Image (cartoon, grey):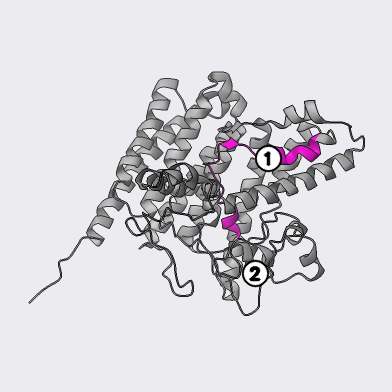
Amino acid sequence: METYGKILLIAMPAFLFLILFEKFYGWYRGKDTVRNMDMISSLTSGVTNVTKDVIGLYFIILSYPFFLEHLSFMTVSSSIIVYIIAFINLDFAGYWVHRIQHEINLFWNGHIIHHSSEEYNLACALRQSISSIVKIFTIFLLPAALFGVPANVIAIVAPLHLFAQFWYHTQHINKMGFLEKIIVTPSHHRVHHAINKEYIDKNYGQIFIFWDKWFGTFQPELPDVPPVYGITIPVHTWNPIKINFLHVWLLMKDAWSTKIWKDKFFLWFRHTGYRPTDITSKYPVYKIEDIYHFKKYDTKTSLALNVWCWFQLLVIFLFVSYLFGNIASINNIDINLIYYYGAFIFLTVYALSELMDRNRFVIIWETIKNASGLLVIYFIGDWFGSDIILSPSLKYVIVTYFLVSESVTVWFVLKHSKEDKFIPIQTR
């Protein structure tokens, strides 16, 4: 937990720099693939995911140490070979978990966030799930357990394997020659993110592309079929927390509404997108039919709103960095405080993205967020030990931030309500 937090303190600014560089490069070359609100939505999604992971909000049904203890029949002595086996096995597991997420209704909910952007850029790589809190696919690490790969090796290699999937989320790198036969390239992954009928549900590989070639899911990018990105049932929100639960909410409503009793229990495990026949017309959902002619989700914005959203995003990064850098110290105060801190981060992301969506109820979420922060300072006496860790004056800066954030949000809500006010159509 603490080690992963320290790693993220280095990784987060590096990723942010590369995302902003891609934005600048695209603008400079006349091919800007990054929209501001979409980018902020992706970045906040990344924040929620890493916060969930660092504070340990997940349950493991079948643990790797259990397999290691009971099933290993040998121990590989070479350290290099151990790490190679771990990396290859993680990639094998990643292929199958990824494929299951795409092909089974229930598990698609844990992956929908990654495909929810209607753009394709480095920021999209950070759209990772917070809804997958139950890890049930450790069984795919069985080969590593059989070879006696230590659990700490898996723990080291896993984040490296994840970070290595960042770079190929871009439209600025074309096909890469012989590497196309070995590793997942931007071209391969553009296909994976596309909703074209030629591309959908293809190229599940994460680092090595040969899994797709071996298991029949490979599709090269075609020169006459430009990829169109997103999902066929668009999410129509910038809020990453909402996006994480949209699909399972639809499944729950379908299971409740259908009169087909078999579907109430089994629609969860049918192919992704399956809906009972008796409710598709009664409760229709919008689905993109013509992928080359649809309106991407967008919201009315302004220079002031863009600047404020970036300010709030940077504040979120500062809050998260404080958490990741001081987990041990916060735990020493009270082991439960990191969960309160995580809830605060989620509230902050939720309030920001509701403002981006121009939802007037943002004022409720903003008030809850700011009140929660002020209560923390009132009851603890500082901001999660900041008097000792950093400076006694920090709590006053944070109190000022909460008051300013509340005031500015109220101003935006009033401003947006005037701009969006309904004007009756004149009739004769």
Q: Is residue 149 visible?
A: no
Q: Is residue 323 above or below residue 223?
A: above
- What kind of residue is marked 1? Ile
**Residue 115's spot in the image, x, y percent?**
54, 57
Q: Residue at 37% of width from left, 61% of height from top?
A: 299
**Callout 2 secondary element:** loop
**Residue 247's spot in the image, x, y percent?**
46, 49
Magenta part of the protein: which range?
A: 122-145
Residue 250 magenta-drawn?
no
Q: Is residue 302 above or below residue 245?
A: below
Of labels 2 and 1, earlier in sequence is: 1
| Of the pair 293 and 290, the residue shown nearer to us | 290
Q: Residue at 42% of width from left, 63% of height from top?
A: 287
- What kind of residue is marked 2? His
**Residue labelled with disc 2:** 172
Check the image and name the residue furthest to the bottom. 224
**Residue 219's spot in the image, x, y percent?**
68, 67
Q: CA distance from mark 2 to mark 1?
A: 27 Å
Contact check, label 2 and label 1, Cβ < 8 Å: no
| Of the pair 340 and 147, the residue shown nearer to us | 147
Q: Residues within 10 Å of mark 2 (few under 14, many from 20)?
A: some
Residue 128 magenta-drawn?
yes
**Residue 251's spot in the image, x, y percent?**
43, 47
Q: Which mark is residue 66?
A: none
Q: Which mark is residue 7?
A: 1
